[in-house]
Amino acid sequence: MTIKVIRGNPSPEELAAALAVVRARAATPPPEPPPEPTADAWSDPSRIARTRLPHPGPAAWSRTYWPGA
């Protein structure tokens, strides 16, 4: 790592303080990405179809809306 002073004339103490800040910043690990949002339960289509669809047949149309009937 090379640091070059372009303007000014810092004292050795000021240069050491600036270097300590740069080194401390470089030593910290990068922040972890936020967790991916999960879908809410109310928007899950599987909650609507909790039971299996009726088997096809002559009376299947009457069982398509009311699963308990």
Image (cartoon, grey):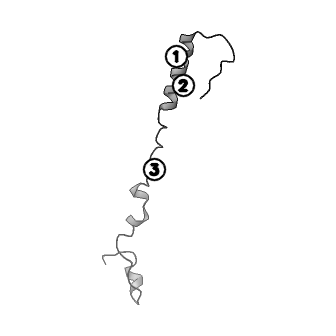
The residue at 49%/26% (across/down) is 24
Relative to residue 10, is residue 48 drawn left or right? Answer: left
Q: Is residue 5 left or right of residue 33?
A: right
Mark 1 nearby-residue class (10 Å; few <14, some 14–19, many ≥20): few
Q: Which mark is residue 38?
A: none
Q: Secondary structure at mark 1?
A: helix
Number of dots carrying numbers: 3
Which amino acid lies under the numbered mark 3 shown in the image of this protein?
Pro
- Identify the mark nearer the N-term, 2 or 3: 2
Q: Which mark is residue 37?
A: 3
Measured in 3D between alpha carbons, the distance from the residue under mark 2 to the one under mark 3, in whole angstroms, is: 34 Å
Q: Quadrant of the C terminus?
A: bottom left
Point out the frontmost of discs 3 and 1.
Answer: 1
Disc 3 secondary structure class: loop
- Residue sitting at x 52%, y 16%: 17
Residue type at the position of mark 1: Ala
Residue at image mark 2: 22
Is residue 17 positioned above or below 29 on the image? Answer: above
Amino acid type of the residue tagged 2 in the rendering: Val
Q: Is residue 43 above or below residue 3?
A: below
Q: Nearer the viewer, residue 43 or 69?
A: 43
Q: Going from the N terminus, do you reach mark 3 or mark 1 first?
A: 1
| Label 3 Cα crowd, 10 Å radius (few <14 / some 14-19 / many 20+) | few
Disc sitting over residue 17 in the figure: 1
Task: Answer with left or right where residue 23 lies relative to residue 63.
Answer: right
User: Of the residues under marks 1 and 2, which one precedes in the sequence?
Assistant: 1
Report which quarter residue 67 is drawn in: bottom left
User: Which residue occupies the foreground of this view, 29 or 42?
Assistant: 29
Q: Residue furthest bottom?
A: 58
Residue 53 spot, x, y in % from top left = 39, 78
